Amino acid sequence: MVRVTTSGKMVTVTIFLLACAGAAPAAEDYPVKPVRIIVAAGPGGGDDFTARQVAAKLSELLGQPFIVENRPGAGGMIGQTSVAKSPPDGYTLLLAGGSMAGARYVNANMGYDLLKDFTPVSLVETSPFVLVINSNLPARDVKELIALARSRPGKMTYATLGAGQIPYWSVVLFNYVAKIEAVEVPYKGPAEAMLDVVTGRVDYYFTPAVGAVTNAGKLRALAVTTRVRSGMLPEVPTMAEAGMPAYEMPAWRSIMGPSGMRPEVVHTLNRMIARALGAEDLRERFLKAGSVPQASSPEDLRKRYEYWMEVFGKIAKEAGIKPH
C-alpha cells in the first residue's frame, strides 16, 4: 500500500506487485525450471516411449528440460499417487493411461480419486488393441473363435497383463459379450504373453498393434478393438465389422497434473502439446508405433475419463468383477 498526497488531500493507492518474493510466476514465464513427467511403468514400454517423444518436443518448444521419470509398481499406483500428491505448480506431470478410468473397479486400495485429484491437460494419442490367436487354432475369424470357445467351455486360455489394464478390459468385455468361459493366464509383461500365444501355450490375447505386426505369420490377427481400422493393419476388421457391433475398447494416453493447477499453466501446456503432436517427425514415430497422435482440450479429456469410468463400471458390474 502506498500513500500519495495530492492538493493537500491524502489518497490511498493499493498496488499489487505480482513480482514480489514468493508470488507465482506469470503463465508466460512458465516453465522457469525443469518439468518432470512421471511414467507409472518401467522403461522401454509404450508409456515410456510416448512420454519421451512428447517430453523431447516440449523441451524444444518451451526452452526447459522435460524429464521423464519412471516410477513403476503396484499396477501404476505408485507413480500415479505420487503425482496426485505433488504441488500443483505444473512442474510434476503424469503420463496417464486410459486404464486409470477402470482402476477403482479392480483395486480396493486406491490412493487417489481420478476426477478430484488430477487436472486434465491434454489427450496425447489413441491406439487399438488387436485380438490375436495361436495360428494352429481352427478359427479364421471372430465368429469361428467364439464358436470354438463355446464348444470347449472352461478349456481355452487367454493372456492378460494383470487386472485393470486395457488388455484386461478388452478380453473381459469380449468374453462377456461373446458368452465365453475361458481360463485367464496373467503375465508380467507383453513379451512373455505374446511368446506363449505364438508357441500355443495360450490360445488368445489382446496385443498392441505393433505386437501383431511384429509377429505376423506366427499368429492370426482377427480384429481391432477400436471403431476404425488400424493404419498398421488395414486388412484386419474392427470388432464391429467382425460381428460384435456393440464392442469398443480403445487405448489412449494423456497428460495430467495434480488437482489445483493454474488455468494459465494448463493452457500453456495444452497449447504446446498440440503443437508438439502436430510435428511431422513426431507424428511419423507415433504411427510407426501403432498409435495416432491426438490432442484435446482439458474439458474433453475430463469428459473422456468420465465416460469410460461409467463404461468400466458397467462392465465390472455385469461381468461380476470385484475390487481386491
Image: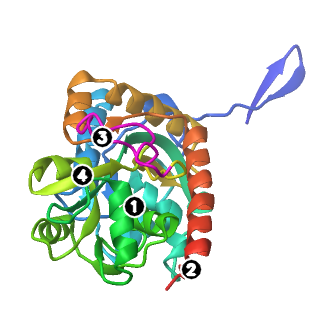
Report the magenta residues as a range: 227-244
Q: Amino acid at mark 3?
A: Ser
In three-dimensional space, the C-alpha distance between marks 1 and 4, rounded to whole angstroms, equals: 18 Å
Dot 1: few (<14), some (14–19), or many (≥20) neighbours within 10 Å?
many
Give the residue at mark 4.
221
Q: Amino acid at mark 1?
A: Ile
| Mark 2 secondary-structure assignment | loop
Give the residue at mark 2.
320
Up the image or down, 57 lies above or below 4; here it is below
Residue 147 highlighted magenta (yes or no)? no
Q: Residue furthest right?
A: 9
Contact, CB < 8 Å: mark 1 with mark 4? no
Image quarter of residue 279: top left
Disc on res. 166: 1
In three-dimensional space, the C-alpha distance between marks 4 and 2, rounded to whole angstroms, equals: 28 Å
Q: Amino acid at mark 2?
A: Gly
Q: 72 or 139, which is in the foreground?
A: 139
Q: 143 or 69, which is in the foreground?
A: 143
Dot 2: few (<14), some (14–19), or many (≥20) neighbours within 10 Å?
few
Earlier-in-chain disc, 4 versus 2: 4
Earlier-in-chain disc, 3 versus 2: 3
